[in-house]
């Protein structure tokens, strides 16, 4: 059973707040959107944890952009299209690539200190890139530095209010439009925020997997709320796995940046062999889907739970200076990255699919815009090129911010609360086990393990059908509950997203980009060179 709103609420008993633009999510896309609004508009940015907790903050590698005289827009466009395996929208790719240098300059204007070499921006390479074109900061902590600058800039803007620890339970809809969101925060409890325009920038859903590079906040809340509000989502089969996630007991699956391979590191199997050379002429610098799938095959061949990254042939001082964060974390586990091989294996990293948006960031629901990982914009196709995600957040964040601000400016202030349809009753149906009897953590862990086993780098119909069976079963009693706190709502959102992902993976009977079906190992352009929208709620 799926319901329109996760909780019952009565507009007469709930406090209200009115704003011009509501931004849900304070990662790079959300804050970039907020910064586009003119000072005359009130912008409220809400995020469920601290302002610093977003996938953007954890980005290591950097931001791709054509900045070197040896590079051309055409090269970046081509590399993005090749990685996207036939599903990118060329017009979107061209728009994003051409805007990249301006967006990087804007970040510098906002105070970001990118790494430099000889007085110029230092540019690195990552898998799938034909040229050095990735700007980075603090060596391997680009997201941290970019977010520091953009948060500071947003805090200085008098028209932007930042609310942390504010969980968005659901989007509010009336007469076929998005009219704001139902949120909850410790100081206020539940609150109805009425917005002339709403921007969804709530990030991804890596937490649906036990092994992920994502922080605990990445539970797909925005995707699930959009789905409940009737917004179209697509491409949900395309979860990108990062090839190299630290595999040491107790390491919480820490990301080892692709830039490590960009600077020359080798991948070796347990016998010390460089196995990528036999798989792809681009070897360690092949796109992520190719490398992740080759690693899985290698682990099966060698019957070993991981492979190894080897930097021992690189200059030690340069390695430490270039990757200070990775050096520190590995040293914490007794590994010297200049000498020791680093045990790694793939982990869920980035959701390519999500809420369908057009070139301006408009969703299929009037009044709702979206940007960043929560979306499917057509930029990434079936596989995202490394370091194109912060870039997408910037370009689409700015687009949405401008579009939403313009639309909000044309709307008069109104402090009338519209009647809302489909509000759930506050009574729990008799057949449903009351919430306290449910062990939310147990179901969450079971779901995350199931997704690794059945919806991982390699899938097939039998495994997907088994996963569908289990997830449908859990959905039957978990989605019917009325929880009162974040872990319960997050579980409902994870289940909703998992169901969409499994359904999409079952439907796409071919292999393309990050979606590898062992029962359909070939790409099938005749039937599948198209994006697939998820079925509507209760559809
Ligand atoms: C990395 O540093 O490998 C991650 C960069 C990205 O996901 O684009």
Image (cartoon, rainbow, N blue to C red):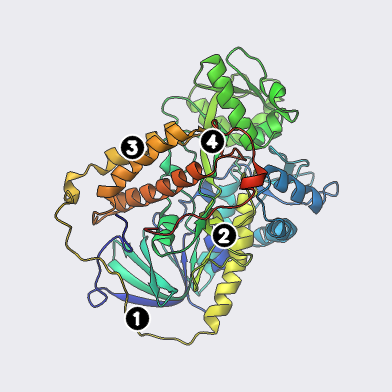
Residue positioned most to the top:
271
Q: CA distance from mark 1 to mark 2?
A: 35 Å
Q: Are marks 1 and 2 in contact (CB under 8 Å)?
A: no
Q: Are marks 3 and 1 in contact (CB under 8 Å)?
A: no
Packing grade of label 4 (10 A; few <14, some 14-19, many >=20) is many
Label whose residue precedes the other's in the sequence (4 or 2): 2
User: Is 489 located above or below residue 325 in the figure?
Assistant: below
Nearer to us: label 2 or label 3: 3
Q: Is mark 4 within 8 Å of ligand 1?
A: yes
Give ligand 1's quarter of the image. top right
In the image, 427 versus 97, the foreground residue is 427
Q: CA distance from mark 3 to mark 1?
A: 39 Å
Tag 2 residue: 150
* Snapshot quadrant of residue 441: top left
Q: Which mark is residue 418?
A: 1
Tag 4 residue: 255
Nearer to us: label 3 or label 4: 3
Tag 3 residue: 445
Packing grade of label 3 (10 A; few <14, some 14-19, many >=20) is some
Q: Secondary structure at mark 3?
A: helix
Numbered-mark total: 4
254 left or right of 338? Answer: left
């Amino acid at each position: 059973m799926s319901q329109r709103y996760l909780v019952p609420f009565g507009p007469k008993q709930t406090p209200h707040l009115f704003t011009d633009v509501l931004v849900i999510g304070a990662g790079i896309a959300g804050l970039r959107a907020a910064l586009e609004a003119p000072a005359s508009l009130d912008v409220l940015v809400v995020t469920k944890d601290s302002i610093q907790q977003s996938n953007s903050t954890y980005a290591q590698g950097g931001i791709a952009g054509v900045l070197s005289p040896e590079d051309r827009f055409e090269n970046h466009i081509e590399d993005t299209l090749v990685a996207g395996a036939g599903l990118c929208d060329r017009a979107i790719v061209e728009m994003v690539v051409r805007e990249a240098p301006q967006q990087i300059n804007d970040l510098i204007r906002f105070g970001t200190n990118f790494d430099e070499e000889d007085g110029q921006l230092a540019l690195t390479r990552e898998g799938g890139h034909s040229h050095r074109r990735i700007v980075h900061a603090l060596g391997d902590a680009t997201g941290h530095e970019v977010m520091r600058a953009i948060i500071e800039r947003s805090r200085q803007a008098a028209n932007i209010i930042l609310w942390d620890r504010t969980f968005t339970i659901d989007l509010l809809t009336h007469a076929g439009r998005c009219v704001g969101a139902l949120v909850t925060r410790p100081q206020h409890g539940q609150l109805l925020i009425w917005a002339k325009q709403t921007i969804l920038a709530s990030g991804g859903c890596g937490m649906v997997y036990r092994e992920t590079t994502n922080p605990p906040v990445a539970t797909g809340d925005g995707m699930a709320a959009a789905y409940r509000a009737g917004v179209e989502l697509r491409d949900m089969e395309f979860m990108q796995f990062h090839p190299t996630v630290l595999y040491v007991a107790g390491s919480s699956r820490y990301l080892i940046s692709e830039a490590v391979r960009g600077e020359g590191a080798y991948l070796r199997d347990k016998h010390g062999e460089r196995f990528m050379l036999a798989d792809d002429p681009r070897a360690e610098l092949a796109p992520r889907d190719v490398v992740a799938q080759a690693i899985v095959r290698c682990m099966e061949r060698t019957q070993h739970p991981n492979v190894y990254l080897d930097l021992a042939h690189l200059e030690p001082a340069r390695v430490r200076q270039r990757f200070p964060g990775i050096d520190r974390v590995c040293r914490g586990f007794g590994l010297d990255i200049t000498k020791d091989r680093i045990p790694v294996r793939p982990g869920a990293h980035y959701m390519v699919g999500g809420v369908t948006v057009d070139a301006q960031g408009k969703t299929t629901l009037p009044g709702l815009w979206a940007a960043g990982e929560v979306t499917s914009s057509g930029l990434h196709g079936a596989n995202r090129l490394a370091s194109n995600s912060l870039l997408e957040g910037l370009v689409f964040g700015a687009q949405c911010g401008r579009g939403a601000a313009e639309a909000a400016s044309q709307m008069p202030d109104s402090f009338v609360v519209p009647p809302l349809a489909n509000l759930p009753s506050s009574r729990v149906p008799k057949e449903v086990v009351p919430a306290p009897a449910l062990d939310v953590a147990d179901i969450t862990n079971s779901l995350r393990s199931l997704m690794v086993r059945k919806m991982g780098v390699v899938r097939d119909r039998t495994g997907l059908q088994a996963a569908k069976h289990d997830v449908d079963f859990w959905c039957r009693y978990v989605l019917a509950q009325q929880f009162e706190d974040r872990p319960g709502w997050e579980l409902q959102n994870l289940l909703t997203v998992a169901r969409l992902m499994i359904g999409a993976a079952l439907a796409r009977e071919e292999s393309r980009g990050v979606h590898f079906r062992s029962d359909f190992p070939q790409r099938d352009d005749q039937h599948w060179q198209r994006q697939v929208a998820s079925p509507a709620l209760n559809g």
